[in-house]
Amino acid sequence: MKPIGELIKQKPWIGWLTFFGTIIVVFFLGLLASSIIERRAEAVFAYTPQVEYDQMEPRIEIWGMNYPREYQTYLKTADTTFRSKYNGAAMVDMLEKAPELVILWAGYAFSIDYNQGRGHMHAIDDVRNTLRTGSPMTPEEGPQPGTCWTCKSPDVPRMMNQIGIAEFYSSTLAKLGPEIVNPIGCADCHNATTQALQISRPGLIEAFQRQGKDINKATHQEMRSLVCAQCHVEYYFKGDGKYLTLPWDKGFTVEEMEAYYDEYAFADWTHKLSRAPMIKAQHPDYELYRFGIHYDRGVSCADCHMPYKSEGGVKFTNHHIQSPLNNIENSCKVCHREETDELIRNVYQRQDAIYQTRTLLEKALAKAHIEAKFAWDKGATEKQMAPVLKLIRAAQWRWDYMAASHGASFHAPVESSRVVSLGLEKAQEARVEIARILASLGYTQPVPMPDISTKAKAQAYIGLDMKELRKKKAGFLEKIVPEWIRIAKEREAQYPINKL
């Protein structure tokens, strides 16, 4: 082979080709180096603190000055346009969609108003605006407790720190209203100094302590679910002080929590029609998630609902907390290789099967409550009705356990199917037992069923005066909310921004 110098003398174009090739390579290497330097500088600038605040700072816009990407994505939780087959971010009147729910919650505030939950940015507004707040069905029901605010705002840990945990719970929703003004935000889940994930709600910490576990020893990946579990769990208001408590002392299954409630003879209310002592499930998302394949594989809530995102030179957690079905490319497809349409179809197949059984359970329960009332009216005794009421309580607990959960049929389809199937069995057993009681009382015909085909008809049947309740609510808002806003503005003026 000839030396390169001799080749260039014989063929000068080779030299020119080498020269320009070198220039091009150097040019692109320069661009790459510039891009790396720029992105590193951008990443450093993005997380250089711009303001100073402490752990009790509840305003997300203040935290957002130091973490603009997380803040901007979190603001997207205000978007209510996404709708999947069964759920989504839009406000949906669930009582209008399924009027049987009015019957299931007769005597309880949920029979007045129940809407599908929207994004975190709407947490405060939705509590203020629902007919369930400020319009008690009876004088005996009294005002809603302060405990109702617990999961709605970073103002909550601030107020718990200021007045005490028990005092916060035993206060009233209206009294705390002027202080609870910021929607769910950064301080609920993050340490203000290190930004590490941390638990701000005592209920979860106390539940783990009663199980002999130290939540402070949880791994970072576990914390990416536990910060969600502060609120997305089953809980109840314990005692006269309405102390928020998680019923996990016996375990996480629907039966173990039921045994916990039964041991305390706990009931949220007595059903207006059947007179059964009822349990109102909240949203046992974490409990059901624990029985699913994703939990077994170490997948956290944030992996699916808040997947990582890259922007410029920065990788960060996307704080647009939402259904993975609205972000499949960055959530599901990190692990799954199926096409998007197939993944969605798989989810809907599971949901269709479980919703079908759940709907049958809803209808059976509505009939059971109505038939139980009919039996009481015919002269049934408490001794005769005791086993019926126990069955109705157990059946509805299983139905509500599923209905109140967000995404149960996706998180744990096998467990979800088991729970609703057992609920349907118990509801049918209750109806058979009622038929036997009626037969012993001399009645052998089918129980006449009222027309509950719409929300309005079902509410009229259980004796709700919706016009009067709306009037009470309007008066509540007119009297309370302006005062809330005035006091909130005065308080915020006392906390100026400390720029660095």
Image (cartoon, helix red, strand yellow):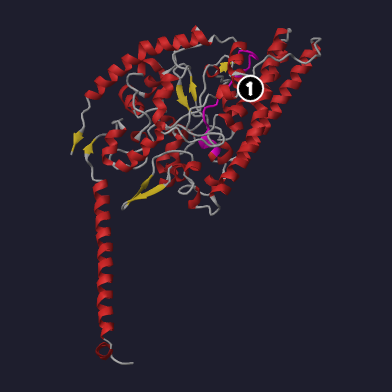
Q: Position of residue 449 (x, y in %)?
A: 71, 15
Residue closer to the observer: 323 or 177: 323
The quadrant in which the N terminus is found is bottom left
Please indicate whether residue 282 sits to the left or right of residue 42 in the image. Answer: right
* Residue that carries the numbered disc 1 in the rendered image: 393
Name the residue rendered at 45%, 46% in the picture.
303
Q: Position of residue 429 (x, y in %)?
A: 73, 24
Residue closer to the observer: 205 or 303: 303
Name the residue rendered at 26%, 75% in the picture.
20
The quadrant in which the C terminus is found is top left
Please indicate whether residue 109 sits to the left or right of residue 352 in the image. Answer: left
Secondary structure type for disc 1: helix
For badge 1, the amino acid type reads Arg
Q: Quadrant of residue 18?
A: bottom left
Q: Is residue 284 magenta?
A: yes
Q: Quadrant of residue 149?
A: top left
Please indicate whether residue 358 sits to the left or right of residue 299 in the image. Answer: right
Name the residue rendered at 25%, 55% in the picture.
38
Name the residue rendered at 33%, 39% in the picture.
72
Q: Which residues are magenta?
A: 271-288
Q: Is residue 38 magenta?
A: no
Q: Tell me if residue 94 comes above or below residue 406 in the rendering.
A: above
Q: Residue 191: in sight, yes or no?
A: yes
Residue closer to the observer: 458 or 134: 458
Q: Position of residue 75 (x, y in %)?
A: 36, 35
